[in-house]
Amino acid sequence: MKPEAYGFPPSAIPQPIRPDGAGGVDRGPRDLLRDWENPDLLVPPVTDAGLVPNLKYSFSDAHMQLNQGGWSREVTVRELPIAKTLAGVNMSLTPGGVRELHWHQQAEWSYMLLGHARITAVDQNGRNFIADVGPGDLWYFPPGIPHSIQGLADGCEFLLVFDDGSFSDLNTLSISDWFAHTPRDVLSANFGVPIAAFDSIPNGQVYIYPSSPPGPLASQKVESPYGTVPESFSHRLLAQEPMRIPGGTVRIVDSTNFPASKTIAAALVEIVPGGMRELHWHPNNDEWQYYLTGQGRMTVFTGNGTARTFDYRAGDVGYVPFATGHYVQNTGTETLWFLEMFKASRFEDVSLNQWMALTPRELVQSNLNASPELMHSLRKEKWPVVKYPGYSYYPR
């Protein structure tokens, strides 16, 4: 397609040329939309070096599973091979749409993107859980705990995260699939009803199916003789008071404030225009990211003279290998929101600035031949997100 078809004059077409003249004009076949969206792949910063694997995949490039009642798409090691610790599913349910009764061999952590849903679960001791969740709410179901999700009157869309990069949501253990693959006489003996009682059961996994929105929560309450689960499977993340620092906000959620979430920790990060998630790394596991709004860029430093920069937009998945240095910079004109997630019980990060500030000054200065200006800028307190007037990134 010619450049004019995109609404841009030929003079505005990005070219793989640095200001110092490195590179050259690309005259061959091109996907211009990709080049516009990924300026740091087309013209990498001069500090990028060596070979770093791909650390980005967009849900927009993922296969859509379309069902009556909703849809889903997933990003696993199949789509992003380096992402071995976590996998993600983006799912939507119509009003009343049901993600059927099922369970997983992996833990399920979820962030509600929009709309409302009703979730149910029963634990190994017969204690049950029923709750309604809305935008910004989380849920967590431990491995092996059976559960369900149903869209309420406005429908819903959410992100599911599983603590195994090779997980696939289409390969879970579903009640309909189990019934369909159990002899009818066995079902009859198990439930104490005639074989004819199973004549209308599905002949395979239904996965997502349409239904009517459920009634008020109180109308569906089921009393268990064993009570309710001792630790809530849901958490209202946006109700948390955030850490407010120059450049944005951070809300951290892990097993300390959401006790049920024992294998996945997370942070919801807000970065205002011109701000950045500071240079840091995580000492406990890889980082799996999901971008909610805005656009940004991230350089990941993997040691031995290697680093690579990627550009991210809403709906993208990012990945950072264990203990590698990185930052996330807002490169747009609107606020950037994204989730950081880890296969861990606790959220942990190490700040480059704080590390330097809490190390003997003479040692830091001699190691980096650091200027007085740099040494005076160091902070003993951690600011996960920063913005300094006059030293921020703004779109050109």
Image (cartoon, rainbow, N blue to C red):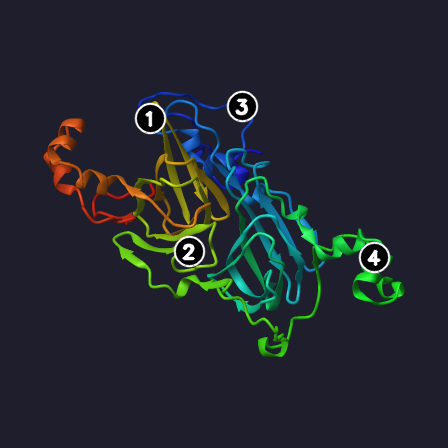
Looking at the image, can residue 293 be seen? Answer: no
| The N terminus sits in image quarter | top right
Give the mark nearest the N terminus, 3 or 2: 3
At 50% from the left and 42% from the top, the residue drawn is 7
Query: Going by the image, does 53 lie left or right of 206?
Result: left
- Secondary element at tag 1: loop
Report how far apart the C-alphas of labels 3 and 4 lie in the structure. 64 Å
Please name the amino acid that badge 4 sits on. Val
**Which residue is labeled 2 in the image?**
255
Report how far apart the C-alphas of labels 3 and 1 lie in the structure. 24 Å
Please name the amino acid that badge 3 sits on. Gly
Report how far apart the C-alphas of labels 4 and 2 lie in the structure. 41 Å
Q: Nearer the viewer, mark 3 or mark 4?
A: 4
**Which residue is labeled 1 in the image?**
46
Callout 2 touching callout 1 (CB < 8 Å): no
Give the mark nearest the N terminus, 1 or 4: 1
Query: Going by the image, does 395 lie left or right of 291?
Result: left
Between 34 and 116, the one lying in front of the other is 116
At 33% from the left and 52% from the top, the residue drawn is 272
Circle count: 4
Please name the amino acid that badge 1 sits on. Val
Report how far apart the C-alphas of labels 1 and 4 lie in the structure. 67 Å
Report how far apart the C-alphas of labels 2 and 1 lie in the structure. 40 Å
